[in-house]
């Protein structure tokens, strides 16, 4: 007999796409991977060098549960340098990926059956994290009219006496859309007025195109702002992220981190110190421009094929596209496209229930030449 929560946690359908794609590749077929949710770029060389030095120098013991003080200072400085916002380093808590940060913050604020409002479509683990904490994830359907994001108005309309807070992801996975600064301010105000807590998942921080990157920290000291080394710094496997928390909650978050995982990985933390060196910043900014060029190729190409992309994605590395012109069931559509022309894409069902059968997520985490090949294959399939 297993705990009830397990049954309520859905598997990643994208993994099934990946398994099927690998089986095709093993059988000698070529596959264009438009399903992968992590950077194709390697970790920047200065970070790799710093990791090797750290291990050679014996930095392999636990750190403080809050993270290395010098890394917490470096993250705080990053906000000052790039976002013009002064954060006390003591408010920065380094975590095992942003996943651990989300789990810590939810452990801090959610009681059994309390509701956390989230956007549908949205990153699936977020609602599962709420469930693992015995809370009640409450998905609010969102569409192009709100840039696939929650708004203050939606938050107010869905608020109930047992709602504890709101989790906003900007830029969003799967839609790549951001919450505009003035809307984030309205959300923050309404959540405060209703006596709730605001969590902002900024894991794609730094990866925005055609608009300057913003952090909710520019607007408030009272939100839990979560970020990661995974995406902008191409460090998914190092399992390192952070949260900037209101000062009064740091001690309790420390207590939780101590008990749940003791500390984030020490070699990863030492390596991450190199993320803020000019040489690394230059590398990751060059990559950001490359993602932007890929997006600028991909979105018009998909639109020309007949996919519906009513809102231009301005961040992350995903396009959320309406495929209802071609198929009534996006899961079947993904299977058919893979089998017929070897293009792997993710069905909408991974991101919620709202119009999921009409949508697919297409990732631009591959070289532009391969993107072009993928588009050509889709053209052949659709014609
Ligand atoms: C919106 C969002 N939040 C959080 C995460 C978790 O990432 P990590 O734990 O690697 O920081 C992801 C990963 O894809 C994501 O897309």
Image (cartoon, grey):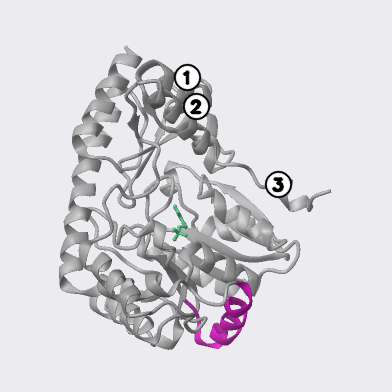
Residue labelled with disc 2 = 330
Across and down, in percent, residue 352 comes to: 57, 42
**Spatial distance from mark 1 to mark 2, Cα to Cα?**
6 Å
Instruction: Tell me whether circle 1 and circle 3 mark residues in contact (CB < 8 Å).
Output: no
Q: Can the viewer see residue 325 in this picture?
A: no
Residue 8, which numbered label?
3
Across and down, in percent, residue 206 comes to: 29, 62
Instruction: Tell me whether circle 3 and circle 2 mark residues in contact (CB < 8 Å).
Output: no
In terms of secondary structure, where does tag 3 sit? loop
Viewport quadrant of the C terminus: top left
Residue found at x 47% / y 82%: 63
Q: Nearer the viewer, mark 1 or mark 3?
A: 3
Q: Can the viewer see residue 372 in this picture?
A: yes
Viewer-nearest residue: 53 or 166: 53
Residue found at x 37% / y 79%: 58
User: Which residues fall within the magenta stretch?
Assistant: 244-260
Looking at the image, is 181 positioned above or below residue 303? below
State whether the magenta stretch is mostly helix, strand or loop. helix
Question: Relative to 163, is 51 on the left or the right?
Answer: left
Number of numbered markers: 3
Viewer-nearest residue: 146 or 93: 93
Residue labelled with disc 1 = 327
Tell me, yes or no, whether the highlighted magenta stretch contains residue 289: no
Query: Dot 3: within a 10 Å radius of its alpha carbon, few (fewer than 14), some, or many (20 or more) residues?
Result: few
Across and down, in percent, residue 143 comes to: 47, 42
């Amino acid at each position: 007999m297993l705990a009830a929560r397990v049954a309520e946690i859905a598997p990643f359908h994208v993994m099934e796409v990946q398994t099927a794609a690998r089986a095709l590749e093993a059988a000698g077929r070529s596959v264009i991977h438009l399903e992968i949710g992590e950077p194709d770029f390697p970790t920047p060389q200065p970070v790799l060098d710093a990791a090797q030095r750290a291990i050679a120098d014996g930095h392999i013991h636990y750190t403080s549960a809050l993270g290395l003080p010098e890394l917490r200072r470096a993250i705080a400085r990053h906000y000052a340098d790039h976002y013009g916002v002064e954060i006390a380093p003591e408010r920065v808590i380094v975590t095992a990926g942003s996943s651990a940060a989300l789990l810590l913050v939810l452990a801090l604020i959610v009681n059994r059956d309390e509701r956390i409002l989230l956007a549908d479509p949205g990153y699936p683990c977020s609602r599962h994290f709420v469930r693992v904490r015995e809370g009640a994830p409450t998905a609010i359907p969102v569409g192009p009219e709100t840039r696939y994001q929650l708004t203050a108005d939606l938050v107010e309309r869905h608020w109930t006496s047992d709602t504890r807070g709101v989790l906003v992801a900007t830029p969003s996975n799967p839609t790549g859309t951001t919450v505009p600064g003035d809307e984030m301010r309205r959300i923050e105000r309404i959540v405060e007025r209703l006596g709730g807590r605001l969590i902002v998942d900024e894991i794609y921080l730094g990866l925005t195109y055609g608009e300057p990157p913003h952090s909710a920290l520019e607007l408030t000291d009272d939100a839990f702002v979560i970020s990661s080394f995974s995406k902008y710094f191409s460090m998914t496997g190092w399992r390192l992220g952070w949260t900037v928390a209101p000062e009064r909650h740091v001690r309790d978050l420390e207590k939780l981190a101590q008990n749940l995982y003791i500390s984030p990985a020490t070699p990863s933390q030492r390596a991450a110190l190199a993320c803020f060196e000019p040489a690394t910043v230059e590398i990751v900014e060059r990559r950001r421009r490359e993602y932007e060029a890929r997006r600028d190729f991909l979105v018009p190409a998909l639109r020309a094929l007949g996919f519906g992309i009513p809102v231009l994605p301005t961040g992350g590395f995903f396009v959320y596209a309406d495929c209802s012109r071609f198929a009534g069931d996006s899961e079947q559509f993904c299977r058919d496209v893979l089998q017929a022309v070897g293009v792997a894409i993710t069905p909408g069902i991974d991101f919620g229930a709202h119009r999921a059968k009409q949508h697919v997520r297409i990732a631009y985490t591959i070289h532009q030449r391969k993107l072009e090949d993928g588009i050509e294959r889709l053209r052949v399939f659709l014609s």
